[in-house]
Image: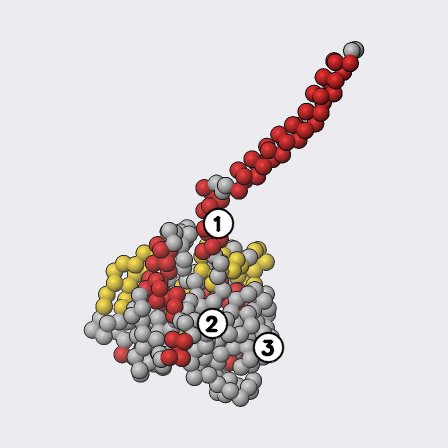
Amino acid sequence: MNKKVLKGLVLIALVAAVVLPVQVLAQMAKQQREARIPTVQQLADMINRKKLDNMVLITGGMNGFSMGLSKSDGGDDYSTPHRVTLSNYYIGMYPVTQGEFNSVMGVNYVRSRFMGSRYERQGGHHPAENVTWYDAIEYCNKLSQKEGLTPVYTISSSTYYNNNDRLSVVTWNRNANGYRLPTEAEWEFACRAGTTTRFNTGNNITEKQAAFDAINGGVYSKTTHSSTVPVGSYRSNPWRLYDMHGNVFEWCWDWYGSYQINSIQNNPIGNDRGEKTRYMNNDPALRSSQGRVEDMRIIRGGCWDSNSLELRSGYRSAALPNTKFNLPESDFNGLIGFRIARNAP
């Protein structure tokens, strides 16, 4: 082999040694650029994750949990402990705030009990209250529409009585991907966060752990609250959920009625209608209502005006879904709000 041929071969080898890695690097860079361009599905997933920023994925499973409260621990015939299993779902990290509610429903949709510069300075971070169950249902639908999701609820056959109380038929599309109220079982499971004690804080709760009437609420502390507090003012439960005890009662989907306790309940949604309860004559607003007294929906968690019993994870309370809570004579004035939930894929 002559020198010219040898030099040619050496030159080709040198060029290949330089060019091939450059080509490989260029191909790798192209692949990286293409990987950074999201597909339609990736975009949808990113948008969905953004919508779920303030929601927590709750993992259900076949093991389930014991739902309810025994009579020896403050329960009654309507709260008999029983076994429940749940599918996965999302639930709001906080109760819906005044700011969030007003941005969806309009500033003047519901008048809060708590007005003035103190609440305005805090930027609408107090929980929405004085909302009826129907207000919460409408909020869920409007938020779903705003974010391009399928509304969960269909509202029909609305009737308004002389005192403007509302009685409507609401149906739930359980396959829809929009926002909704949690079921009572979902709410309690999320509140407990794996605990089996009276509260998710243990068997005691203090004013340093929740907003409630600790003076009249028992022996745990010597302070009381006169209003709601901004959401997230206290430490979360083990599953990063805030205000599950106190601040505001929270609406659930279910009618108030006896639990079905004869077998393990999977994803229970409550009874077909409500039952008469001990609450039926407690509130002047309820006594004057022309809605059926037995048509009550579940509220959970207690509120800033509650005693410690009402804060217990398994304790059940109820109210008429159409009660006008901003009436001065209403015992529920400023006490009830809600948090949202969604199905998990």
**In this view of the protein, which residue sits in the foreground, 204 or 102?**
102
User: What's the CA distance linking mark 3 and mark 1?
Assistant: 40 Å
- Height in image: 37 above or below 178? above
Residue 251 in view, yes or no: no
Q: Nearer the viewer, residue 218 or 257?
A: 218
Give the structural element (helix, strand or loop) at label 3: loop
For image coordinates 52% across by 77% down, the residue present is 210
Residue type at mark 1: give it: Met
> Which of disc 1 and disc 2 is earlier in sequence?
1
- What element does badge 1 sit on? helix
Q: CA distance from mark 3 to mark 2?
A: 23 Å
For badge 2, the amino acid type reads Val
Q: Are marks 2 and 1 in contact (CB under 8 Å)?
A: no
Cα separation, mark 2 vs mark 1, equals 26 Å
Q: How is the image coloured?
A: secondary structure
Q: Image quarter for residue 219?
A: bottom right
Query: Label 1, on which residue?
Result: 46
Q: Which residue is mark 2?
A: 231
Between residues 213 and 52, which one lies in front from this camera angle? 52
Q: Is residue 326 above or below residue 99?
A: below
Q: Position of residue 266 (x, y in %)?
A: 50, 57
Q: Which-is-in-front pick, marks 3 and 2?
A: 2
Residue 74 placement, left or right of 97:
right
Q: Which residue is mark 3?
A: 203
106 with respect to 123 (left or right): left
Residue 123 is at least partly visible in this image: yes
